[in-house]
Amino acid sequence: MKNKLLALLGGTLLSASAMAGGYQVNLASQRQIGMGHTGTGIQTGTSSIFFNPGAMSYLRENGVTVGASGLISKIAYRAPEPSGVEAMTDNPLGTPFQLYGVYGINDKLKAGLGIYTPFGSSVNWGDEWSGRFGLNELSLTAIFIQPTLSYQITDQIGVGVGFIYAVGGVNLQRSIPVQNQQGEYGRAELDGNASGIGFNAGIFFQPSEKFSVGLNYRSKVDMEVEGGDATFTVASAVSSRFPAGTQFDARLPLPSTLTLGVGFMPTEALTIAVDASRVGWSAYESLRFDYTAEVNGADFSESARNYEDAYIYRIGAEYKVSDVLALRGGAYYDNSPVMEGYLTPETPDADARGLSVGLGYAVSENFSIDASFLYINKEERTDTGALAGGIAGTYKSVAYIPGIGLNFKF
Amino acid sequence: MLALFAGILLTSCDPEIDAPSASAGELDLTKYVAVGNSLTAGYQDRGLYREAQLASYPALLAMQFEQAGGGEFVQPLFGTDEASGSGYLRIDRFENGRPVMVPVPGQAFREGTTLPGGPALTKYTDPVQNLGIPGISVLASASPQYGAINPYFERLLEPGEVGSKTYVQEVIESQPTFFSVWLGNNDVLGYATAGGEPTSPFDNLTDRNVFGSIYNTIIDGLTTGGAEGVLMTIADVTAVPFFTTVPYNALALERQEQVDQLNAAYGSGALGFSFQLGANPLIVRDPSAPAGLRQIKPTELVLLTALDSISGRGYGSARPLPDRFFLDESELQMIAEHTTAYNEIIRKAASDNSLALFDANAFFDSIKGGFVFDQVTYAPVFVSGNLFSLDGIHPTPRGYAILANEMIKTINAEYNANIPTVDVSQYRAVLFP
């Protein structure tokens, strides 16, 4: 009888939405952010470790780059009409960063190490909003560590490949729709560390001083969580359905990215870059948690994601005003991988437009500074989320991302 | 400088979602009056108390109306010093998976005065707009004596009006610009919750012609001044956990010894039935059956109030379940026929007077299988279904909020209004120990 009576308690708890969606973070170099985050078809300095390891072999000096961005994002929500119910995220400041070092073993062979953060998400809807039984907050982090070798086969062609070791973690919190005598809702928190491996390979071809082209492939990285902690706070009458000490396993794919880029250098002062990327989001079919104990009657939960491969188109330019000052600008259009019916509050994704500006300033022969600012505006999107356990309504996201980077040559 | 830049952006460039503004459409929401019974009063957990009143659907409607130019809405709220009102039930603990309920004592009683319908409640004679009277039926609303019987009605009346003023008069005097009427439930529920064995004259099934005459008097009176409104139909008893929680085959026999004992006690099959291991139909009293008892049929409904008697005192097995604890086929048919007839009267009144109609009967019928809203599961299931309170008949605050939203959608459609709906997540369901 107990099972029967309680069978419907928070029936969709944990079976529904979860970690993240279009959670790629394309902020890998302060110079390139200023240029619309292009960079696969041109020489980008040390950040070729990320954009195209094939171009890394063209570096004539050893160098170290360190940079970071401050990601300020806000998402507005409005429940389906005629509801007047609204919410706004209170997301913590995101801090994607990058660190690149390149060392020339000889004229043709370069070794490099990149540490960067190409995926992540930080969304906090709080525990008052109407969708809190779908999600309170989510934090997803991934740091890629990539040792890389690049070889210049001829003056015109370079190839490179890097091995990726990724470490990160996930923290997901949501309210459980069971209230205690004080009217307080229960809470579920899933917290775990994750790791995975992959590679990044590229080829760079520069037939003339005025034209270059590059092809880059960053593989999918499956982030595996093993033995993460599932912690539940619920009214004591139902606590037996949410056992203490429960652990979970999960797997989150960080999708592959295939990019073709070209560069035009009509004058010595002007560089124009165009990139087209295909992101292999179709790898993200579902989000599944396997528990070590039965949680509210089931030892796993799974909800569909069925992302589609998505395409990103970028254009950017750099103009060297003088020997020490460069101005940059760029734009991109980023297709959402989230199909209709699959929108969730973790990443209420939509087609996005990005606009960027940047500048570079050479303090000395060996030291330069890059500053960038990127504005991302996602299209307003209305969805039921019914196929993925989402929260129906209209979502609108914007982000403001200032960043700064330091470059040392030796 | 970056921080300053970011700060300016943060305050001036929040994402915005454009939406149509709230509007009353063709309605004048200056004075909203709610007419009805316990459902309108906000009654739940077998009682009327302050917290429940604050989440009554009329209070929620009025709150939303205010965003579209609606006026003040006064309820006969129990004061904070008498917040538990009539008293109500709460879950103390679970035993063998079943909730054990204990009463929270009422605080709003008038010392020494008891009416036929229960102890008298503290008076609230200022004009109110929530005229929900727990227990009232369409039949009772035309009775001058009813004010001396029902403590919830007596509470609202001046001493001189008690026993002389009808509820119909009280309603028509209220002169609203907009009204809601959800009456008629008790014209079947009194009979149904008594297992078809009513003990009070107001608990019989009301004659449909009498129902129609009184109901239309109320609607005519309310619409005389040109007021608009929304009418609600009556849900089927089969949509309510009070009648659906205890299954007909609630007699669970786990040991052969129990089976043998019962078979021996009931004539070893001579009465036309025998017992088996597992789930068995309950044994009920039926004067027309051989030996005055029989197995209950799958189509018949056991009342929630029978639960303790079945599990604790051997009713339905060693002792046949008395008539007052179940509804047999003929009683159910009577209830269904009357419900249908009343709803026809209500629907006709709505269309004749061009009023909005919230078809609660159709709504509750549509959610029998449950539904998911914002990742919470709802179903007409006792305790765990989030919709119904601990009496199994009346909604939880969240249930009332969901009903209020359905009413708002109906009103919007009928009157070209755009009244925003309620954030249901701000209202509680059943509280667990």
Image (cartoon, coloured by chain):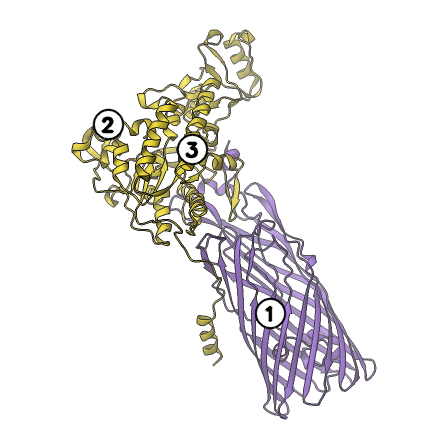
Residue A189 or B369: which is nearer the viewer?
B369
Q: Callout 1: helix, strand or loop?
A: strand
Image-based side of B7 in relation to A297, left or right: left
On the image, the x and y values in percent for residue B285 come to 44, 14
Q: Which mark is residue B251?
A: none
Residue B108 lies in what quarter of the image?
A: top left
Q: Colour of chain B?
A: yellow
- The correct choice, above or below, for B275 with respect to A152 in the image is above
Between the C-alphas of marks 2 and 1, the distance is 71 Å
- The correct choice, above or below, for B375 with respect to B301 in the image is below
Look at discs 2 and 3 and give the one toward the viewer: 3
Pointer 3 local density, CA inside 10 Å: few below 14, some 14–19, many at least 20: some
Between the C-alphas of marks 3 and 1, the distance is 55 Å
At horizontal 61% and vertical 80% (from top left) the residue drawn is A329
Same subunit: marks 3 and 1: no
Q: Colour of chain A?
A: purple
Q: Which residue is mark 3?
A: B348
Residue type at numbered disc 1: Arg
Residue type at numbered disc 3: Lys
Q: Callout 2: helix, strand or loop?
A: helix
Residue A103 lies in what quarter of the image?
A: bottom right
Residue type at numbered disc 2: Pro
Please report contact status of discs 2 and 1: CB closer than 8 Å, yes or no: no
Pointer 1 local density, CA inside 10 Å: few below 14, some 14–19, many at least 20: some
Q: Which residue is mark 2?
A: B144
Pointer 2 local density, CA inside 10 Å: few below 14, some 14–19, many at least 20: some
On the image, the x and y values in percent for residue B342 come to 41, 28
Q: Which mark is residue A353?
A: 1
